[in-house]
């Protein structure tokens, strides 16, 4: 059995809602710790899915491939949101940011 099977649409939508709520809380409070919690949760989930993939039977591989794909998408989403919230927090507190990691992204838009 796959732990937190993201190939199930209901669980994938629930994971997306939880991620969006944490990103919304981070944006409202302007604290990047909430976005980093979100990122670490999905990193832990991808580690769990990889460990399950190594011990899974061939019938479970399809569901684990789908779950790993969703994991990578969620990690990308939460990493970009972490950089965005961290930049907002640095501007609000007049802290010098290590780098402006999203400047390359915003310049292209």
Image (cartoon, helix red, strand yellow):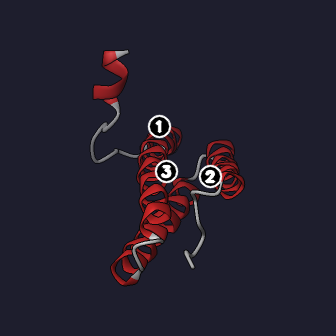
User: Can you tell which of label 2 and label 1 is closer to the viewer?
Assistant: 2
Q: Position of residue 15 (x, y in %)?
A: 64, 56
Rendered residue at 40%/53% (across/down): 72
Quadrant (top left, top right, bottom left, bottom right) of the C terminus: top left
User: Can you tell which of label 3 and label 2 is closer to the viewer?
Assistant: 3
Rendered residue at 68%/49% (across/down): 13
Give the class, few, some or many, for how many residues have Cα within 10 Å of label 2's Cα (few <14, many ≥20): many
Q: Cβ–Cβ below 8 Å for labels 3 and 2?
A: yes
Give the class, few, some or many, for how many residues have Cα within 10 Å of label 3's Cα (few <14, many ≥20): many
Tag 1, which secondary structure?
helix
Q: Relative to residue 7, is residue 10 drawn left or right? A: right
| Quarter holding residue 24 | top right
Residues at marks 2 and 1, CA–CA distance in whole angstroms: 24 Å
Which mark, residue 91? 1
Does 87 sit above or below residue 59? above
Residue at image mark 2: 19
Tag 2, which secondary structure?
helix
Give the class, few, some or many, for how many residues have Cα within 10 Å of label 1's Cα (few <14, many ≥20): few
Residue at image mark 3: 74
Residues at marks 3 and 1, CA–CA distance in whole angstroms: 26 Å
Q: Position of residue 88 (x, y in %)?
A: 50, 38
Q: Position of residue 108 (x, y in %)?
A: 31, 17
* Front in this rendered view, residue 48 or 54: 54
Tag 3, which secondary structure?
helix
- Outermost front residue: 59
Does 88 sit above or below residue 50? above
User: Can you tell which of label 3 and label 1 is closer to the viewer?
Assistant: 3
Does 75 sit above or below residue 40? above
Q: Position of residue 69 (x, y in %)?
A: 42, 52
């Amino acid at each position: 059995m796959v732990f937190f099977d993201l190939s199930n649409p209901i669980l994938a939508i629930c994971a997306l809602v939880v991620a969006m709520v944490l990103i919304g809380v981070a944006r409202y409070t302007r604290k990047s710790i909430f976005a980093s919690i979100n990122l670490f949760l999905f990193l832990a989930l991808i580690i769990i899915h990889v460990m399950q993939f190594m011990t899974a039977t061939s019938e479970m591989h399809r569901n684990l491939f789908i779950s790993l794909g969703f994991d990578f998408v969620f990690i990308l989403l939460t990493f970009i949101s972490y950089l965005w919230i961290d930049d907002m927090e640095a501007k609000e507190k007049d802290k010098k940011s290590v780098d402006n990691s999203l400047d390359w992204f915003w310049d292209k838009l």
